[in-house]
Image (cartoon, grey):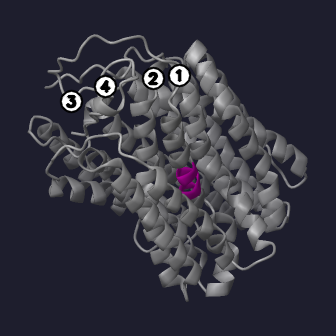
Amino acid sequence: MSTHDDTALRDRTATPATTGPDTTAPAATAAPERLSSGDRTLIGLLLIAGFTVILNETVMGVALPVLMRDLGVSAATGQWLTTGFMLTMAVVIPATGYIMGRFRLRAIFLTAMSLFTAGTAIAALAPGFGVLLVGRVVQASGTAVMLPLLMTTALTLVPPSIRGRTMGTISIVISVAPAIGPTISGLVLSQLSWRWIFIVMLPVALIALSLGAWKVRDVTTPRPARLDVLSLLLSAVGFGALIFGLSSIGESAGGHVLVAPWIPVAVGVLALVVFALRQIRLQESADGPLMDLRVFAQRSYTVSALVLIIGFMAMFGALIVLPIFLQQVLELGTLETGLLLLPGGLVMGALSPVVGRLFDRFGPRPLVTPGVLALSAGLWLLSTLHPGTSSVAVVGVHVLLSMGLAFMITPLFTSALGSLPRELYGHGSAIVNTLQQLAGAAGTALFITVLSTTTAARVAEGADTLTATADGVQGAFMWGGIVSLVAVAVSLLVRRPATTGDAPVAMH
């Protein structure tokens, strides 16, 4: 179990940190409304580092055609630069709850940023595709730890009364960094080679690492714990196989497949069932589970996580399909594509802190339900795209979709994680970030599969490639709109967390 006993370092919090059910701390005083300068500096450094590493999750999409040409690889092979990144994230993130309970914050930060920096350098210097893929995997190993670390630290330091505005700022990292990845990639590729995507990132990573070595301090006390190796293996096989299978669905629809997608999906599901049963059994042991599934006993966590999954499916699916429409149907270049996707990312970034403040005042549901409705409307409008659609209309609908996501992500993350007792922060963050990776893979699989199969069917009927691709894009967004209706219904169940995160978790 992950434990965050930071009482000695945080005498300004509303209630003392707990290390289990038997705390005998004195009565709490009123919660302060402001963070100390040291806490703000620490969270600020983690935000910078988190933005830098998460940005890299989506930079390869626009660059894929250039990489295919320069490295002489097929689309199915080149796609592994994104799939491999997601696979690594899915394998590492489940272990972050254990990592944050077992090791000190400073050591975790330095290790994660060092891995990311090393991976960026390897990718920048890669002589061929194989080494470039290794660099992406090393990058992802550091990235996987950074976001759960950022969330857990913020939840540990920030009083519940101002938690929404802090999570609003964190949402910039969660949502905006992936959203503007294609824009940055397009800008770089318009003037320079693909290597510069990594070269321009390297000094930023080095600065973040240096500042962290100087300023990051420990705010948690680790607890000795045994790593359950079998749980780690089951987790790696389960999440890895499931994401591989989902990613392969789109490739198989386009005629490129190494193995039938249902095989890794079935293996992944089976491994995760065994993994879950083992975690339940380990809850009664002294060392605790690798991922504590008791987070799902909190209704706010489960409902918020479900809506988040659908939101991230839509976001990652749109990030894949919209560039295809802009480049293959409207016949725009990488630079124009990147610039047209930028307004949505900027709007999301501008709204996230505002939404966080509104959350502190009004709670989640008045924000989440309108946000999901805007997301759904955006997807249905995108399902009407055709070869005569203007690029201005595409930007307008993408901004609407981004506004919907901005009103969803901050309240949902805050409601989910804020409903947990302190000792489950690390596990809750690890699980919700793992679900985010699965949602991204599932969204990509859904959108690409519909796009590929519809396009192939229309070509077989005699349609030209441009018209067939436009029909495929319409079909992909239509199915996204159908899925979004589930999120609309579930959003009505979202409530403000009943707990403040200080109550101990009930033992079973």
Q: Quadrant of the C terminus?
A: top left
Seen from the viewer's position, the closer of residues 244 and 6 is 6
Residue 198 coordinates in the image, percent (x, y): 61, 72
The residue at which mark 2 appears reads as: 159
Residue type pointed to by label 4:
Pro
Mark 1 near mark 2, Cβ–Cβ under 8 Å?
A: yes
Disc nearer the start of the sequence (3/4): 3
Q: What is the CA distance from the residue labelled 3 to the residue labelled 2?
A: 18 Å
Asked whether residue 430 is drawn in magenta, I would say: no
Q: On the rendered image, what quadrant is the N terminus found in?
A: top left
Q: Quadrant of residue 8?
A: top left
Q: Earlier in the sequence, mark 3 or mark 2?
A: 3
- The amino acid at mark 2 is Pro
Q: Relative to residue 373, is residue 387 drawn left or right? A: right
Q: Badge 3, how many Cα within 10 Å: few under 14, some, many 20+?
A: some
What residue is disc 4 on? 421
Residue shown at 50% from the left, 61% from the top: 209
Q: Which numbered disc, 2 or 4, marks the residue closer to the eye?
A: 2
Q: Is residue 420 above or below residue 153?
A: above
Do labels 2 and 4 touch, CB within 8 Å? no
For the residues carrying marks 3 and 4, which lies nearer the camera in this image? Answer: 3
Q: Which residue matches tag 3?
A: 19
Q: Give whichever of discs 3 and 1 has the lower sequence position.
A: 3
Give, as a single range, the part of the protein colored magenta: 48-54
Specify the principal SS of the magenta part.
helix
